[in-house]
Image: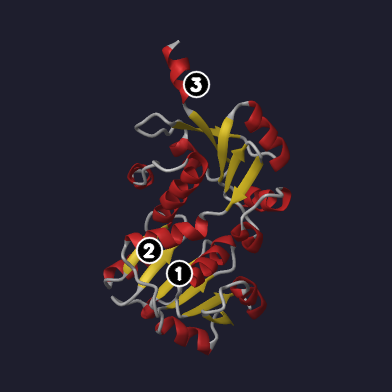
Amino acid sequence: MLARAILTAMHLVAAVGGDPDLVHLLRGYRDLDQRFLVHPVAAIATAPLVDALRLLEFAGALLLAPALQREAARSLERTSLDVREVGAADVLVLTPAGPVADLQLGRAIGSVLRQRLWDPRGARAVVVGADLAARAAARELGSLGVAHLTVLAGDRPEADRVADGVVAHTTVAAHAFGEAAANALLERADLIVRGVDAPEPSPHVLGPHLAVVDLQPAAVTPWRRQAIAVGALTVGARDVEAHRLHLALTSILGPGVALEPLLALLHGA
């Protein structure tokens, strides 16, 4: 009876789809104040998912699978500008007026860089890749105020699509991997963000002047290990994921969600 009363007082948050290891970590996650409980839910289409979550009185959902994130962006009417621009949503908030979809991935990259005291003013940034993470990162870096943003992708049209929508006050260049201009821009970069599906930039561009965000799904990738060895500021996928979960849970539940337990949870895996 007591357990049922505690659960009734909590807000339920669904973790939908995604990496099984991450879902396992989040299963049963709750904050110290017992305000919310994260519960895994099977990945289904957005419309029946919303209906099921409403029936079970969930407050919202963490959308963890890229395919589900894209489907949610297409299916829901009430979405943020980031969702419309990037074409993906990673959090669903169930409000009395209807479901609202948002994208926190780009903001999470900005959040972790601010936490590490990285200053975007006048910086030259390079985003490597053309996946959802790369598109979200490009938009966020433009909003943070970097002076110059380069996007490197498999070909020039892919790079152009990632760069499209970056704020006007940022100078933007789009190049294919391996172009001479692309290599020169990597060498002059203050920040390199490597997307989930992107190849490793050459290690010769690394140095103590550089900040690196590596979104590859590993605790420490070989490329990031090389960056650490030469004194670069580095951020891994687990850091970004913890910040993304923190922002998503805050959007569902309001202020008061703590970041540190999420960082400890993901880095303890």
Quadrant of the rendered structure where residue 129 is? Answer: bottom right
Mark 1 or mark 2, whichever is nearer to me: 1
Residue 126 vs 196, above or below: the answer is: below
Mark closer to the chain start, 1 or 3: 3
Residue 53 percent coordinates (x, y)? 63, 32
Amino acid at pointer 2: Leu
Residue in the image at 46% along x and 49% along y: 247
Residue 91 percent coordinates (x, y)? 56, 47
Residue 48 visible in the displayed image: yes
Residue 143 percent coordinates (x, y)? 50, 69
Residue 198 visible in the displayed image: no
- Res 103 label: none
Residue in the image at 46% along x and 84% along y: 185
Quadrant of the rendered structure where residue 87 is? Answer: bottom right
Residue in the image at 45% along x and 57% along y: 108
Mark closer to the chain start, 3 or 2: 3
Residue 206 vs 25, above or below: the answer is: below
- Res 8 label: 3
Q: Pointer 3: residues within 10 angstroms few (<14), some, or many (20+)? A: few
Marks 1 and 3, Cα distance to the nearest angstrom?
A: 40 Å
Q: Which residue has dot 2 on it?
A: 113
Tell me if label 3 and label 2 are in contact, CB under 8 Å: no
User: Which part of the image, by quadrant, shows the N terminus?
Assistant: top left
User: Which part of the image, by quadrant, shows the C terminus?
Assistant: top left
Q: Which residue has dot 1 on it?
A: 144
Mark closer to the chain start, 1 or 2: 2
